[in-house]
Every structure is written in C-alpha cells, then in structure tokens.
Image: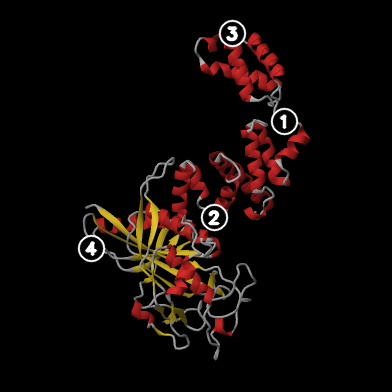
C-alpha cells in the first residue's frame, strides 16, 4: 500500500519587544542566568501581571500580514502543568478566544526552476495566539539547571492546519513565514537564540484517503533544515511501522539531529490535561476597528509581492529577487541605489554578488555581524560607481578592483580613480595605434574575424586592454578594431 504524509506545524515566535509579556522586566539574549526576573516571573505570592501593549499590537500586525481574522475580543487563560520551566506551575496563554483566527502563508511549490518564479500556493492557518514563554532547561549527566531569563517573554504561537504534504513544503513554509516576520520587524527569528521554535505534527494515511492518521508530535527541531530532516525521518519511520503490520500511537517524540532519528518522549497530552480556565488576574482585550486600521497602515510590502514587483517593474531576474527579498534592509538599500541610476538590473547584481560577499567576509574576519545600515558604502556611493561604468569613465573590471576599498574605507569611486589614475582612456589616436599593432601582431585572429568568426576579435581586444592596463574604453576599442578590420 502506498502512503502519503499530512503535516501541521506549531511555530513559536518570540516577539521583539523591550519588556516581557506581563511585567516591565526587560528582554534580551545572552544575559547572565536568572538576571531578567522579578516576583511576577518567579510566581511569588502577591505578584500580579500587567499586559504588554506592544506585544498585542505586534500580534495584530502578524494577523494582518497573514490574512487572519482579528478577534474583537480575546482573553487570557491559565494552562496548568507542573514542570520546572514555569515556577508558578501554569502558563498564561489563550485557549478558546485567541487574538487571531484563520489565515494563510504563501509558499513556493517544491521543484521550482532556480532561474524563474514558479507556482505558489497558500497553506491554511488554524489560529495564532499570544502567550508567555517559559524558562530554558539545560540537562547534564546527573542534574539539570534552569534559566528564567526567557520566561515571560511574549511568545506568538502560529498553528497551521494539517495542510503540508512533504518535507520540502515544510521547508518552504518555514522559510516564507520567517521572511515575512523578519521583514515586518516582528522578530529576528534567530533559531539559535530560541526566537523561532517549531513543533511538527506528522501523520500518514493511504493515498486517496481523506481520514487523518495517528498524529505524532516532533520536538527538539532547532533549525529549518532540521525540521525538514526530522519530518523526513518520521515519515519513513511511520511508513515502515505500518508496512510491517504495526500500530502507531499518538505520542511526542524527540528529534536527535546528530544521529538523525527520533525517540519517544511521552504520550501526547490532550487539551483537558492542562485544565484550562480564564485567568482571574487579567481582563479580556477588546480590539476595535480603529486600532486594527491604524496598525494596518504600518504593514510592509510582503516579500513575495515585492519579488513579483521587482521582476515586473524592474525586469530583475528571479535569482536576484530571491536573494534580495528575504531581507528588508537589503531591499531598502537596493531601491535607494537603483533610484539614482537607470540600470536597476546592474545595481541588483552589485548588491547581491559584491555587497553581500563583502558583508559576509567582514563578518567572518571580525567575528560579528555587520549591520547594513552601518556600512561605509552608502547607496549614493554605489550608484556613483554604477553610473561611472555606464558613462564609460571606468571599465567593469576597474570597478571590481575599487569595490572592496570603497566598502572598507568608505571612499567614493571618483576619489579612488583620481588616487590610482584609473580613469578610462578614450584617446582615439592612442587606441587606434594600439589596435593597428594588435592586427599586425596577430594576423591569424584578424583573418579568422574577417572570415566570419566573431569571437576571434576578443584576442585583439585583449592585446589592447593589456597594453593600457585595462583602462582603454572597451567600446572605443571594439569600434576601432572593427573599422580597421573592415578596411
């Protein structure tokens, strides 16, 4: 019998806010353990929660970004469980009245061409709810330590329908969702810092069946590729169990990324196991139309919409837009640069190939990420470089030579050209003499070109460019050679 997978994802996103969800304690990564706490975080008697307005607004923003229905009223519930990561023994969450309902995430379809945009589809969402994060447990051989710095941070849980059908779709879904959230400045979504975490619910069923199989939840998925690999393994494992006549049980399993297999953790809890009830210390939140409309005006252009616009209006290739549109800052840099030139395609090439290379190299050498807004190479300076090439003042090769120094020292192209004496040579008499010499020294190439072999002219061009240290105007060289060869 042939089986197919059905997958749903629960994605937890830590919102980028200055303070925690129900207290003024600050948020932050890498602080000394248990320094971002107070009586509310530690669940001490008499400590009362107060809602974080910024977190609620960012949640509404995500809902609008993903075409959700924003609830007119959402409320807070206590999710009761006993575990060291939550010292008050319950988590403040949302059970039956979440902040957002429904929604969708646009994804690329697996198998798209690497050179052109292919078919897309939307993955349906069930809901998005807001809650407080829990502490982080670190397990050792004989004991465990807990750090409550993360506890209480605003956490958004984005729950999809069982509407994904392959590990590749899972990868595209998470990539698309992350790009949208980062672009809207909701979160940095750094999985290494726990800002984006994912649990996968996987079941298999006979091909053609509409009934869902037994669901297995997969945890400890720490990278987007890790989620894809874990789902891939679990599909194989479940298929093998059924093919051998076994029975699948609803359970939670842990993914081992080093050994690349899953192991049982516990049988799956049901909603009633958590004994949800409304939090008596928090009032419901009323979200009116005026509030939603104000936030909707702050929404950025969605990454896929931006990609389609770049391809249609600027005639950019798919490869360039794929690299640009995952980074809002990079897009803003590109658009500002392109607005100062007439050749957006060439600007995109410089940004995607040269600028990103230098940024990556700088990060590797300095050990820390260089923010684009702090780069010494401003959009106006890059635009000047591109325009100098277009005006025939320097060659593309000379520009490639200048670019690293422009990036490192912040000097303009014109400054470096003057310092190095690299301005393009368009002296007709000098170039004509060198072209005549090239034809004399390489009669074979000249005869081949006259005989119809267009590429033979490149050998003659090479002679002239070498003689002028690459500073001869290529257009003038080409025109002069063709005129001399035709005479």
Residue at mark 4: 211
Q: Disc 4 on helix, strand or loop?
A: loop
Q: Looking at the image, which residue is at 71% across and 16% down? A: 429
Residue at mark 2: 328
Mark 1 or 4, closer to the camera? 1
Foreground residue among 40 and 268 = 40
Quarter of the picture containing the C terminus is top right
Q: Hey, which quadrant is residue 193 in on the image?
A: bottom right
Mark 1 or 2, closer to the camera? 1
Is residue 434 among what the camera can see? yes
The earlier-in-sequence mark between 1 and 2 is 2
Horizontal side of residue 248 vs 68, given as left or right: left
Residues packed near mark 1 inside 10 Å, few (<14), some (14 to 19) or many (20 plus): many
- On screen, residue 104 above or below 335: below
The earlier-in-sequence mark between 3 and 1 is 1
Horizontal side of residue 281 vs 4, given as left or right: right
Q: Disc 1 on helix, strand or loop?
A: loop
Mark 2 or 4, closer to the camera? 2
User: CB under 8 Å between callouts 1 and 2?
Assistant: no
């Amino acid at each position: 019998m042939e089986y197919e997978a059905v997958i749903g994802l629960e994605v937890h996103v830590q919102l980028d806010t200055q303070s925690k969800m129900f207290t003024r304690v600050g948020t932050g990564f890498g602080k000394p353990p248990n320094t971002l706490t107070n009586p509310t975080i530690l669940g001490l008697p008499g400590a009362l929660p107060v809602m974080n307005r910024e977190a609620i607004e960012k949640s509404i923003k995500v809902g609008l970004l993903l075409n959700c229905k924003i609830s007119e009223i959402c409320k807070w519930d206590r999710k009761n469980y006993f575990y060291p990561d939550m010292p008050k023994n319950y988590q403040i969450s949302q059970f039956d009245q979440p902040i957002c309902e429904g929604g969708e995430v646009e994804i690329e379809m697996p198998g798209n061409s690497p050179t052109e945009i292919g078919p897309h589809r939307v993955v349906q969402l069930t809901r998005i709810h807001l809650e407080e994060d829990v502490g982080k447990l670190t397990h050792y051989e004989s004991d465990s330590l807990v750090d409550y710095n993360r506890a209480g941070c605003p956490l958004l849980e984005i729950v999809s329908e069982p509407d994904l059908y392959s590990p590749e779709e899972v990868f595209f879904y998470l990539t698309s969702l992350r790009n949208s959230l980062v672009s809207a400045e909701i979160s940095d979504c750094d999985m290494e810092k726990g800002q984006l975490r994912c649990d996968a619910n996987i079941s298999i069923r006979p091909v053609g069946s509409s009934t869902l199989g037994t669901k297995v939840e997969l945890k400890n998925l720490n990278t987007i590729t890790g989620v894809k690999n874990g789902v891939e393994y679990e599909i194989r494992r479940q298929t093998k169990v059924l093919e051998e006549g076994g029975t699948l049980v609803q359970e939670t399993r842990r993914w081992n990324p080093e050994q690349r297999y899953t192991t049982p953790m516990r049988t799956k809890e049901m909603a009633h196991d958590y004994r949800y009830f409304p939090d008596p210390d928090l009032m419901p939140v009323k979200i009116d139309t005026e509030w939603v409309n104000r936030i909707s005006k702050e929404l950025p252009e969605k990454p896929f919409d931006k990609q389609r616009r770049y391809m249609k209006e600027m005639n950019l290739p798919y490869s360039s837009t794929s690299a640009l549109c995952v980074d809002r800052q990079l897009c803003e840099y590109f658009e500002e640069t392109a607005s100062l030139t007439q050749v957006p395609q060439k600007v995109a090439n410089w940004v995607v190939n040269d600028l990103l290379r230098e940024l990556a190299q700088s990060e590797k050498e300095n050990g820390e990420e260089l923010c684009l807004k702090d780069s010494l190479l401003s959009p106006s300076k890059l635009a000047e470089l591109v325009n100098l090439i277009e005006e025939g003042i320097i060659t593309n090769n000379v520009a490639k030579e200048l670019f690293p120094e422009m990036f490192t020292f912040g000097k303009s192209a014109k400054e470096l050209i003057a310092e190095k004496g690299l301005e393009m040579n368009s002296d007709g008499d000098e170039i004509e003499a060198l072209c005549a010499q090239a034809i004399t020294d390489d009669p074979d190439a000249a005869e081949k070109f006259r005989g119809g072999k267009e590429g033979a002219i490149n050998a003659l061009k090479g002679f002239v460019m070498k003689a002028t240290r690459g500073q001869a105007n290529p257009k003038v060289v080409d025109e002069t050679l063709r005129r001399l060869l035709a005479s």
